[in-house]
Image (cartoon, rainbow, N blue to C red):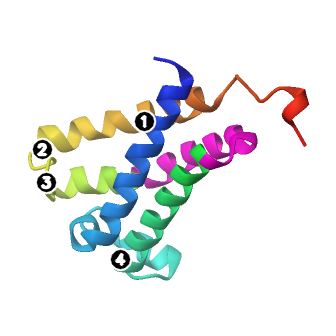
Amino acid sequence: MSRVAARWILALLLGVAGVAHFVSTRGFRVVVPDWATRFTRMDKDAIVLTSGAVEVSLALGLVALPRERRRIGWATAVFFAAVFPGNVHQWRTGRSVPGLDTDARRFGRLFLQPVLVGWALWATAGDRPSRRHRA
C-alpha cells in the first residue's frame, strides 16, 4: 500500500470515528476513565465530543494540508497515544460497545493502538512536497 493510500484511509477512518462521537456520545462514554474528568475538568460527554472534534480535524488536516503532513502525522500519533488509557479502562472494566463486546475483543483492541500510532507516522513520512511547491 502506498503512503498516499494509507493517508487517505487513515483520514477516512478518523473522520468516520470522529463523526460517530457526535452521533453516539453515550456509546463512547464507557471508554472515558473517571480520572480523565478530574484531569480535564470536563464531563464525559464533553471529552467524547472534544475527542470527536479532534479526530475530524486531524482527518481534514491529513487531506487538506499537504505541507503540514508530517506535523499532522505526529499530532495524530500523539492523539492515538493519548486515548490509549481509555482503551485500557474499557478492557479493565469490561464495558461493552458495539464490536467490542467480549473481554477478548477489548483486549485485542489494545494492540491496535500501537499499530495506529505507527500507521500515522509511516503514512505521513517522506514524499514531501518538492522545494518548488513550498512557500
Q: Which quadrant does the N terminus fall into?
A: top left
Q: Is residue 71 magenta?
A: yes
Q: Residue at x 45, y 39 (%)?
A: 10
Mark nearer the viewer, 3 or 4: 3
Mark 3: secondary structure? loop
Q: Are marks 4 and 1 in contact (CB under 8 Å)?
A: no
- Distance in Å between CA atoms under marks 4 and 2: 23 Å
Q: Which residue is mark 1?
A: 9
Q: Residue at x 16, y 48 (%)?
A: 100
Q: Which mark is residue 98?
A: 3
- Distance in Å between CA atoms under marks 4 and 1: 28 Å
Q: Which residue is mark 4?
A: 44
- Distance in Å between CA atoms under marks 2 and 1: 28 Å
Question: Which amino acid type is marked by label 4?
Answer: Lys
Mark 3 crowd level (few <14, some 14–19, many ≥20, 10 Å Cα): few
- Distance in Å between CA atoms under marks 1 and 3: 21 Å
Q: Is residue 101 magenta?
A: no
Q: Quadrant of residue 96?
A: bottom left
Q: Which residue is mark 2?
A: 103
Dot placed on the residue nearer the N-terminal end, 4 or 1:
1
Q: Is residue 127 left or right of residue 18?
A: right
Q: Residue at x 48, y 47 (%)?
A: 80
Q: Are marks 3 and 4 in contact (CB under 8 Å)?
A: no
Mark 4 crowd level (few <14, some 14–19, many ≥20, 10 Å Cα): many
